[in-house]
Amino acid sequence: MSGPETLPLFGEPVAPGPLPDPVAPPTQPEPVSAAPPLTEALVVDPVAHAAEIKRFYRRVVIGPDEHCAIWTGAISNDGYGTFSITRDGRERTVKAHRFAVAYQLGVPVAFGQVIEHAACDNPICVRAHPDPAVGHLWPSTQADNLRRMAARGRGGGRPRWWIRRWSGLLRHERAERSRALAAAVRDRGWDETRVRAVLLTIDPAQMSLFP
């Protein structure tokens, strides 16, 4: 059997960006910034934006093994995480998952470019990684590659109860579930019982996306 598919979109494989030392996330939800959205390509430089990166990952609870990395910062009314950055001396707002991709994949994320939660469909997951067997996020041009890998048995045949059809929720439902999921891990870190309790409210009768 051949090995995993290569993903040539960004040229030579890159090492994922290093994660800052774990720090307890803020215990209270953050308000969504009133700063306007960034309308140019999002670039996250590991040196120039080191303080931003550290601040970003203070708001992330990384699940074990192949589970999601859950954003616990501000969440907008569409259910997606938001993060404030400074570019050219001005505060701007970006989606948290887009920031994660720009940093971890080391590529500019163009304004309007679709970044898909191709593995988990979880709007507040920020688990980006250049290895498609590890990351949950990818530019939409590579989403089909991820789906094919998932269909072939992502996770070694273990149950993937954490994969839910978030996209089947209405906008306000998605926002409610996102905030509930963030709250489930914000104060005590990863707790599978609490995470499961939230995720299984998303269409409890459904099959996994990738059975």
Image: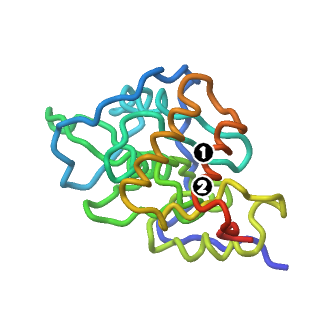
Q: Which residue is mark 2?
A: 135
Q: Rate crowding at label 1 as few (under 14), some (14 to 19) or many (20 or more) other CA atoms within 10 Å.
A: some
Indicate the position of residue 143 as horizontal and vertical percent values: 52, 71
Q: Nearer the viewer, residue 132 or 165?
A: 165
Q: Viewed as shown, does residue 23 lie left or right of 174?
A: right
At horizontal 44% and vertical 27% (from top left) the residue drawn is: 54
Q: Which mark is residue 10?
A: none
Q: Rate crowding at label 2 as few (under 14), some (14 to 19) or many (20 or more) other CA atoms within 10 Å.
A: many
For the residues labelled 1 and 2, the Cα–Cα distance comes to 22 Å
Secondary structure under badge 1?
Answer: helix
Look at the numbered discs 1 and 2 and tell me whether their residues touch, using CB distance below 8 Å.
no
Residue 197 sits above or below residue 113 on the image: above
Q: Quadrant of residue 21?
A: top right
At horizontal 44% and vertical 51% (from top left) the residue drawn is: 106
Q: Viewed as shown, does residue 62 lie left or right of 137?
A: right
Q: Nearer the viewer, residue 201 or 71?
A: 201
Indicate the position of residue 128 as horizontal and vertical percent values: 53, 51
Figure coloring: rainbow
Q: Which of the two labelled residues, at mark 1 and mark 2, occupies the earlier sequence position?
A: 2
Q: Viewed as shown, does residue 4 lie left or right of 186?
A: right
Indicate the position of residue 184 as horizontal and vertical percent values: 57, 34
At horizontal 74% and vertical 58% (from top left) the residue drawn is: 160
Q: Which residue is mark 1?
A: 198
Q: Quadrant of residue 96?
A: top left
Q: Viewed as shown, does residue 22 lie left or right of 56?
A: right
